[in-house]
Amino acid sequence: MSSLIRYISKPHPVTGVTNAKLGTWCFLASEVMLFGGLFSTYVLLRTGASHWPRGSELLNVPLATLNTLILITSSVTMVMSWASLAMKDFPKYRFYMASTILLGLAFLGVKSFEYGSKFSHHHFPSTDPFYAIYFTLTGLHGLHVLGGIIVNTYFLFPGSALWRTEPEQFTGRIECAGLYWHFVDLVWIFLFPVLYLL
Amino acid sequence: MSGHAPEAVKKHVKIYVAVFAALATLTVVTVAVSYLHLPLRKAVVVALAIATVKASLVALFFMHLISERKVIFSILALTLIFFLALLTLPFLSS
């Protein structure tokens, strides 16, 4: 495979980065536009509404704060899993990657509880524009967290076999997976105040 | 970054811990400010300013932008232009 796709572990002489990293950043640019469109929709709905509730009046701020701290911690464990590989410490990599996955699952668990609470009070996306954009933005973000968990789980178990044969390439893969995971954290950093606090 | 020497990465680890502490503190500050019940315009400015600082910390240190190559910044600059254009659209319609 490495003979077909070049510069996946060594930087390309023209760009100075690996093709894998360049591709990941291009993908993240498209993700910015995806969420950007929805943030724009939020602004349009809010500025066009005669009344818009404060998120803190309707949503559970302490739970969302907990989720923010969970996601921030998972970003640290994710970058530590990359740093462990860069320091050639594979057992530590496994510990930090497993922690990242568990924290991601904890985030989704808390989010599911929040959703359950909303549904039990008959608050659905069809209830009003606030809940429509709340469920759309947090739902899409939640799907991204789930996608990250699936990729990270692959790299924790079957994907980690690459470490034995191509450690540099595997470290690059974890760096790219990390870029995605940090992006998901970054989106939440904006979603939290916009939806819950303002 | 994947080509960094183990010694250099050990120094990074200390920075990651410091960034984590800053992010956690700023999260608490964001929530605390929301209890001040500022007027909406001020609340938006403060909340987005704190979120921008937090996002910058994540991008600079966890995503290694602080030591990234020019080509990545070129992609991000282009993305930023289109992102800002998207956010401007709602105001053009009114």
Image (tube, coloured by chain):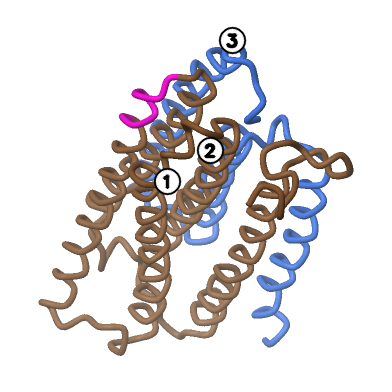
Chain colours: A brown, B blue
Q: Quadrant of residue A43?
A: bottom right
- Which residue is more in the foreground, B10 or A58? B10
For the C terminus of chain A, the image quarter is bottom left
Q: Are marks 3 and 1 in contact (CB under 8 Å)?
A: no
The rendered magenta stretch, by its main secondary structure, is classed as helix
Dots 3 and 1 on the same chain? no
Q: Are marks 3 and 2 in contact (CB under 8 Å)?
A: no
Secondary structure beneath label 1: helix
Q: Are marks 1 and 2 in contact (CB under 8 Å)?
A: yes
Image coords of residue B29 (percent x, y): 40, 37
Picture residue at 72% right of the left edge, 65% below the top: B84
Dots 1 and 2 on the same chain? yes
| B38 up-or-down from A95: above or below | below
Amino acid carrying mark 3 in the image: Glu
Q: Most extreme residue toward the left, as rendered?
A: A120
| A120 up-or-down from A173: above or below | below
| A25 up-or-down from A85: above or below | below
Dots 3 and 2 on the same chain? no
Instruction: Specify the label residue B7 is tagged with.
Output: 3
Q: CA distance from mark 3 to mark 2?
A: 19 Å
Asked whether, in this view, residue B65 is left or right of residue A156, the answer is: right
The boundaries of the magenta stretch are A89-95
Q: Is residue A90 magenta?
A: yes
Image coords of residue B32 (percent x, y): 35, 41
User: Around disc 1, counting alpha carbons within 10 Å, would you say few (fewer than 14), some (14 to 19), or many (20 or more)?
Assistant: some
Amino acid carrying mark 2 in the image: Phe
Secondary structure beneath label 3: helix
Mark positioned earlier in the residue sequence (1 or 2): 1
Check disc 1 and report the residue beneath it. Answer: A159
Picture residue at 73% right of the left edge, 82% below the top: B92
Q: Most extreme residue toward the right, as rendered?
A: A14
